[in-house]
Amino acid sequence: MHEVLHDQLMSLARYVRDPQNNAPPPGMEARRLAVYRQLFFGNVESLLSGGFPVLRAGLGPEKWRALIDTFYAQYRCQTPLFTEISGEFVDFLAEGGGDALDLPPWVVELAHYEWVEAALLLSDRREPAHDPKGDLLKGEPLLSNLAWPLAYQWPVTEIGSDYLPQQAPEQPTLVLARRGADQKVHFSRLAPLAHALLASLQERSGTGRDHLEALAEAIGAEPETILPQGLALLENLRAQGVVLGTRA
């Protein structure tokens, strides 16, 4: 009896996921199967439509529906939590899940950009121990876990139903996403130096002087010329809560 029930449930699940390539379970009328399909698929489609409104509008209803159909049929999410399905959708796109649909080349980056807001809002990561008044040159500046420097090849901040670029610009789109004390996510454009500094803080340990000297070397500048500007930038980032201070 247990095996029969298991087989019936698996047959139903396969059909609900992908009715085009799986036979319906024997003994179930088409009307009931359509209700199950709409309940399960509709919940996922509604969730993703709310999480990726710009992507949905940019693709148009037909391609969006085809993309969600493919995701629902083929991708095996690793979480049962609805709040994490958006992240799974981004992974699906990054892994080439929509390649067969001939999607625009900016789809993966735009999806990631839209996902960032929800990811930061729901993040429960705690900030590391730090000295908020520490010396940002001599000490090790700490980037907030709720501040993410982002770099995109495509102009994700501008893409919309009225602007669908065919070619990536020469300059990347550099963005800082952060969750503020008001519990809202704020996005701001970054200058190349600011992004390089934040990315350096995110990727490796070192004193503020270490980070700034490495940046100076990367751009072929003398450290003494970049230190005052870099320190002023670090202080400004600390005032915004992007840099917490120095490691305790």
Image (tube, rainbow, N blue to C red):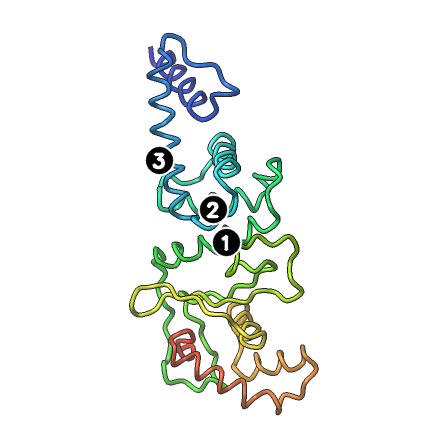
Residue at image coords 51%, 45%: 91
Q: Residue furthest front?
A: 162
The amino acid type, in three-letter code, at marker 2 is Ala
Q: Is residue 129 left or right of residue 189?
A: left
Q: Which of the pair 134/92 is nearer the observer?
A: 92
Question: Label for residue 160?
Answer: 1
- In three-dimensional space, the C-alpha distance between marks 1 and 2, rounded to whole angstroms, equals 7 Å
Task: Single out the residue that lies furthest toward the top.
Answer: 27
Front label number (3 vs 1): 1
Q: Earlier in the sequence, mark 1 or mark 2?
A: 2
Q: Amino acid at mark 3?
A: Asn
In the picture, the disc for residue 43 is 3
Q: Residues within 10 Å of mark 2 (few under 14, many from 20)?
A: some
Distance from the alpha carbon under mark 3 to that under mark 1: 24 Å
* C-alpha distance separating marks 3 and 2: 19 Å
Q: Position of residue 19 (x, y in %)?
A: 47, 21
Give me the residue at 37% from left, 18% from top: 33
> Going by the image, does 205 lie left or right of 246?
right
- Quarter of the image containing the C terminus? bottom left
Determine whether, in the image, residue 122 is placed left or right of residue 96.
Answer: left
**Residue located farthest toward the left when viewing the structure as drawn:** 182
* Placement of 66 over or under 160, stated as above or below: above
Where does label 2 land, which residue? 57
- The residue lying furthest to the right in this view is 220
Residue 204: name its quadrant.
Answer: bottom right
Q: Residue at x 54, y 84 (%)?
A: 230
Residue 181: horizontal and vertical position, in percent? 30, 70
Q: Please report whichever mark, 3 or 1, sits nearer to the chain's N-terminal start.
A: 3
From the viewer's side, name the closer residue of 48 and 169.
169
SS for tag 2?
helix
Nearer-N-terminus badge (3/2): 3
